[in-house]
Image: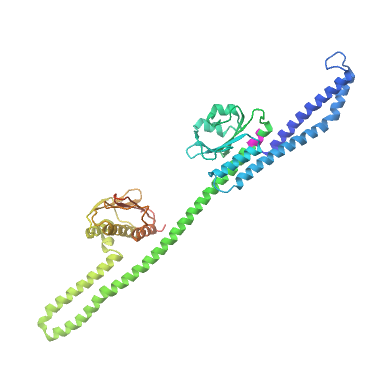
Amino acid sequence: MNRRVLDVLIGGGASLLAAGAVGATALAAAALVAGELPGREGWGVAPVLVATGVGAATWRPARRVAREAARRGGTGGLRATDRIVRTVAGSRGELGESEVVVELAAAVRHGFAARRVAVWQAGTAGELVLAAVVPGATAPGPSVGLDAPTLRALRGAGVVGRAWLELWLPAVLVDVADDEVRAVPVTHEDVVLALVVLARPTAARFTPAEDALLADLGDRLGVVLHNRVLDATLQTTLADLRRTNEELRASRVRLVTAADAERRRIERDLHDGAQQRLVALAVHLRLAEQTISEDPAATPEVLGTLGAELREAIADLRNLAHGIYPPLLMDAGLVEAVRAAADRSPAPVSMSTDGVRRYPSEVEAAAYFCCVEALQNVAKHAPTASVRVTIVDAGDGQLVLAVEDDGPGFDPGAVVAGHGLMNMADRVGAVGGRITWAAAPGGGTRVDVRFDVDTPVGG
């Protein structure tokens, strides 16, 4: 109900009161002139003329005085609702915080001179939860379930009294005895956000003007509380975005650091391994030329030695390439590459696959190295454990990978994720996958990875 309607109601009520007062005054004046009460035979034209004159003379002043008094009272009520709305809108914290709800109850109690105000807040399961009582408890209290008929009735009820509550929501009539009761549904776009229940002593009945003010308060509170919900949701979303951004930044730093470390490792392995073997092979080739020229009979032996050194150099290069991107993964796919890695593992490994096909190279590499990392973790932390590897194409655009061991496990709450788990998380996250791990003391460890294989990598 808007303020224009309230002004009409207030003005109309004031006019009725003024008319009653003027009529009573005119009759009293006529009775004085006639010397007897109305209806007797002594009443003539004179009393009637006196009554008419008194009514005409007093009507406008009386109406003006009544309207000004009513307007002062109505404006005071509107100021009270303004204070209540400002109190809730200006409160810090989220809607669900008890301090905000208590402030709302206290402001309503003060603004409408209520003995007791209870605020029932809409819960997540379609119920009303007693959030605050003033004066009284501030902790969440009992809840009242709302079935579909009651919810529909509450949405369209407006300001209601005791009779309506006894029919539809008797459970909210707590500690009100025989008080005069009003309940104000706080809704926004047909969504019930709260129910405010006011109680007064029977002698202090709610007037029609106060009912109108309560209806206006319910409408305005609905907008304010809805905005607070939106603001709280926005703040939560922003916090999630900030946390995700920090995690992404940290992940990128780790990826860059890992790439630099990998480049240094490759350089070191090339220098200490394949390069040294090739340099030695070049020296031995020169020596072989001299030896063969001096002793041709030694040719087979010299060539055999050179061939062995060449095969060792090739093996070093293959091992180095295997660490960068396994040729078997490129040629035969994920299952064969993981099976080869399982055969190299010191722990006994069983494999189970279903529907696995070829995927983008980035996905296959991330899945393969996650398996290798998990197998290395088992060898390091649970050398006596057995391992089960499962690779399944779920058929819904999901490639699912799981590595599970029956080792001693660990307490996730007491152990910080190590480099192995962080490396897996970074690899999987880089191609849009998701990784989770579960462990328990004495219950082994399980790593689960999911890739969206129908979504382009980097899309």
- Classify residue 291 by image quadrant: bottom left
On screen, residue 263 above or below 376: below
Please give the name of the residue rendered at 26% of the width and 73% of the height, measured from the top-left corner: 273
Question: What's drawn in magenta, residue-wise?
Answer: 211-215
Q: Please, which residue is most extreme toward the top here?
A: 41
Does 141 sit above or below residue 450? Answer: above
As drawn, is 322 to the left or to the right of 303?
A: right
Name the residue rendered at 58%, 41% in the picture: 102
Q: Residue furthest right?
A: 46
Q: Is residue 190 among what the camera can see?
A: no
Residue 212 within the segment the image draws in magenta: yes
Indicate whether 301 appears above or below 383: below
Q: Nearer the viewer, residue 164 or 340?
A: 164
Residue reaching furthest to the bottom: 294
Residue 127 in view (yes/no)? yes
Q: How is the image coloured?
A: rainbow
